[in-house]
Image (cartoon, helix red, strand yellow):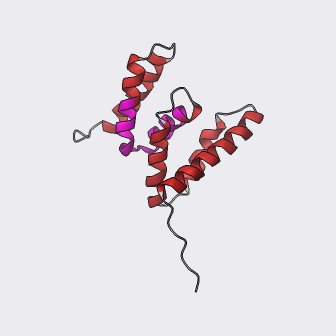
Amino acid sequence: MEEAAEPLDLDAVRELMNAFWDRVMLQRSKEKDPQLALGDLDAVYQRLDAHERQLADVVISEWLAQDGTDRQFTAISMIDRHGTVSALPALRAAEARFETASGPSAPYDWAKVNRVIGRLVDGRPDL
């Protein structure tokens, strides 16, 4: 009888996602098309089971704190694509950072995060 695989914990999922991201971004940079990394990550995300997805959502929310990185903007896109309501606290923290940021992209970043928050809470007054 084969033993069932041990379920992954948050640290294992974090390590796997970060390693995957690093590999994909290296490859996509060589191909001069880093935008395709989002599609690669999305394809992997689609194959996760419910428990793994919950853990991946935590890691993706953590990526929001990485100001000015490709991971941060990929996180915003993934949260928007998948309607990840559990990411609302991280989105609100990013929104507050962008609101007080002085960089040239800050108003656009703030608007993007604000739109995602609006889509997640639209019609859900309990959030």
Asked if residue 109 is positioned above or below residue 44 in the image, the reply reads above
Segment colored magenta: 72-93
Q: Residue at coordinates 64% horizontally, 34% vertically from top-left?
A: 35
Along the line of sight, the residue nearer the viewer: 67 or 41: 67
Asked if residue 6 is positioned above or below residue 95 in the image, the reply reads below
Q: Position of residue 82 (x, y in %)?
A: 45, 45
Tell me, yes or no, whether the highlighted magenta stretch contains residue 91.
yes
Which residue is at the far right?
A: 30
Q: Residue at coordinates 38% horizontally, 19% vertically from top-left?
A: 99
Tell me, yes or no, whether the highlighted magenta stretch contains residue 75.
yes
Q: Quadrant of residue 33?
A: top right
User: What secondary structure predominates along the stretch shown in magenta?
Assistant: helix
Q: Is residue 5 left or right of residue 55?
A: right
Q: How many marks?
A: 0
The quarter of the image holding the N terminus is bottom right
Q: Position of residue 60 (x, y in %)?
A: 49, 43
Q: Is residue 81 visible?
A: no
Q: Is residue 36 left or right of residue 60?
A: right
Q: Position of residue 51 (x, y in %)?
A: 44, 60
Q: Is residue 41 visible?
A: yes
Q: Position of residue 113 (x, y in %)?
A: 42, 28
